[in-house]
Image (tube, helix red, strand yellow):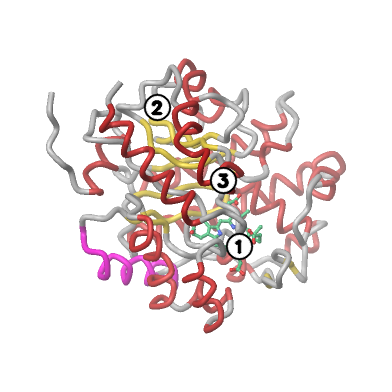
Amino acid sequence: MTITALSKKERYQLTVKGEETDRPPVWLMRQAGRYMPEYMAMRKEYSFNDLCLNSEAAARASMLPLDILDIDILIIFNDILTPLADMGIMVEFPDGGPVIRNPVRNSEDLNGLQYATFKNPPVAQSIRRLKELVGDDVPVIGFCGSPFTLAAYVVEGKMSRNQDEIKRLRFEQPTILAALLDRLTETAASYLIAQIVDGGADGVQIFESWGGVLAGNGDYMEFAGLYQRRLIEKVRAVCPDTPIQLFLRGSGGRVPQMAASGADVISIDWQTPLAVARQQTNLCLQGNLDPTALLVPGCIEDQVARMVEGFDWRRGWIANLGHGITPQASVEAAKNFVKAVGNLARKGG
Ligand code: CP3
């Protein structure tokens, strides 16, 4: 069967539904970032926070991967921590990672948090502006952090490898952690709904960057999985037709739990082969090249072939990395990735 060329938006929408397309859509998590000289040039003009709040600048940053890589899906330039300001959480972005001045560690801190609801926030304005710039044929997705991942930053107050503070809270005062997760679920739901309803986002992705650190004995489901599912239910109740994607770092062995979240697209890291994930779910999969491969432009074609070994890439697959692109990645390697995915369909096989 020959399928005529589709618009980027049609390709995305058909793929999410598991239908065959002309080729798999491809994008990169954190695709507008420091590996791009054009992004670094914008950062000379704007602080990171300004870029998140200024919709014209955010739209221009979001568009760079379309101009430079001819990417299929644009993600709005923003950060998972941006909505926390509306809860009274003071987030700063110095070099070396985000810092929170007033972390939440006890019930008093928790009671001091404000309720955040979003009506046409800057991120929604950025999405609308981006859609004006790129036209209706390019899908634009919004995003948020999962409740547990947001809680990890809110409790730790900074980047943390082991997440000791949030785990201490889990073992010492689990009801406070649960109450914090409830509050963050409300914030994240309202933030995603605003991106869809006010901004017109064509899909949304939930980043579960830290839930993977939780024990597999039930803790993952109790403190991460449960709130992903509640968040998805809240968004779906208002926006039933918008695809919801769930990314989990630490997805190895957790594909069935991810599928149970109710998400439409399951975005896995590089530890599980796509072919194995496919045995565990029929949902659309996204991923999962090891981002470190993008340091070496010459290895990409082979690595893409390895990534899809034994996997039917023709339907239900959005090509992406297994986590965000790093500042050290080469633009040439990113271009090779987009080309190699396109070549799969040209070569058939
Ligand atoms: O994908 C895109 O191009 C859209 C933009 C985007 C950013 N952050 C911009 C950003 C997205 C989707 C995010 C998500 C995000 N932010 C996550 C989830 C994804 C993941 O990687 O697990 C997390 C955990 C954050 C929190 C955050 N923001 C961290 C840990 C850092 C510092 C570490 C780092 O990568 O630099 C940020 C800052 C940040 N967010 C930058 C960018 C481009 C770099 C800041 C700069 O430009 O100086």
Residue furthest bottom as drawn: 45
The C terminus - image quarter: top left
- First in sequence: mark 2 or mark 3? 2
- Is ligand 1 within 8 Å of the beta carbon of the residue shown at mark 1? yes
Instruction: Label 2, secondary structure: give it.
Output: loop
Q: Quadrant of residue 67?
A: bottom left
Q: Residue 61: where, in percent of width, then height?
A: 43, 69
- Is ligand 1 within 8 Å of the beta carbon of the residue shown at mark 2? no
Instruction: Label 1, secondary structure: give it.
Output: loop
**Magenta-colored stretch includes residue 133:** yes
Instruction: Quickly name the residue at label 3.
Output: 296
314 is higher (above) or lower (below) than 181: above
Instruction: Quickly name the residue at label 1.
Output: 81
Residue neighbourhood size for the residue with mark 1, other residues' Cα within 10 Å, grouped as few (<14), some (14–19), many (≥20) = many
Nearer the observer, 163 or 341: 341
Q: CA distance from mark 2 to mark 3?
A: 31 Å
Q: Residue 1: where, in percent of width, then height?
A: 13, 23
Q: Residue 9: where, in percent of width, then height?
A: 25, 48
Nearer the observer, 152 or 320: 320
Q: Quadrant of residue 74?
A: bottom left
Number of disc labels: 3
The residue segment tinted magenta is 120-136
State which mark lies toward you, 2 or 3. 3
